[in-house]
Amino acid sequence: MLNQTAHSIELAPTGTASCNATNRGHTTGSSASPMKLDSFKVACSSCNLRELCLPVGLTQPQLTELDTLVATRKSVKRGDALFHTGDPFKSVYAVRTGFFKTRISSEDGRDQVTGFQMAGELLGLDGISTDRHACDAIALEDSQVCVIPYGQLEELSREFSDLQHQFHKIMSREIVRDHGVMLLLGSMRAEERLAAFLLNLTQRLHARGFSASALVLRMTREEIGSYLGLKLETVSRTFSKFQEEGLLEVKQRDIRITDEAGLRALVNSVRC
């Protein structure tokens, strides 16, 4: 159960079903933070993230066709929104650099973090069903995304079955990921939740060429708690406990996993 759990509790990179909870509408206008639209050409065929993103498995001619879709990038400053709840859905976004969180808001104004997204992952799929976004996507650091107009993506997907297949795989992955989050929130203790979270995060970062044991948390402990369904004090206390037990070395946001097997043993104690 360890590998299944640690792998399925991914950080909702695109926030599809995760964003579809009750939320507070958000209108956009002059108050929305401006985003820089970069005019230079984006080429999926030369992107070092293409094996983690939408173009997985496409041939060179198919990549060239996809390049015609992904014509622009957007730069989003730390703390600014890529989109808000209620915004019209027009595009999906591939994170090129940086880190995002998705969140929903309840009627009484409380925010719930529904996922964290990093380079090579997609944002915006939550808007497909209603043609409006169902969550906010906020940059946790200065970030850049590739803009993929959804209407044109649909047309190209009908032409290239490989692209359609990959898109369906991404959406299916979201369903599996949501199941993992339900397991995390429904049956795991605080220690198990945080262990699964850290294992998943390092796994995803390692796939992008980063260390498998050391990382810098882009999110706050309060945001981790919101995602894991834990209070801030519980998150802080659990980090301290892991450090005391020799599982981690913690220095503010700098984390080093010193006993991966110990963390996995915590997660492995969960049974479906």
Image (cartoon, rainbow, N blue to C red):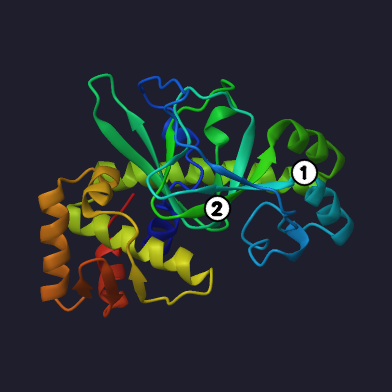
Q: Residue shown at 57%/36% (left/top)?
A: 125
Q: Is residue 182 above or below residue 203?
A: above
Q: Is residue 269 visible?
A: no
Indicate the position of residue 228 as horizontal and vertical percent values. 27, 47
Q: Earlier in the sequence, mark 2 or mark 1?
A: 1
Q: Is residue 45 above or below residue 260?
A: above
Indicate the position of residue 144 as horizontal and vertical percent values. 55, 53
Quadrant placement of the N terminus:
bottom left
Indicate the position of residue 140 as horizontal and vertical percent values. 38, 51
Q: In the picture provided, is 23 more to the left or to the right than 148? A: left
| Most foreground residue, 19 or 149 | 149
Question: Which of the labelled discs sits on residue 87, or is there none?
Answer: none
Indicate the position of residue 138 as horizontal and vertical percent values. 41, 42
Mark 2 surroundings within 10 Å by alpha-carbon count, few (fewer than 14), some (14 through 19), many (20 or more)? many
Q: Tag 1: residue type?
A: Leu
Which of the 4 image quadrants contains residue 214?
bottom left
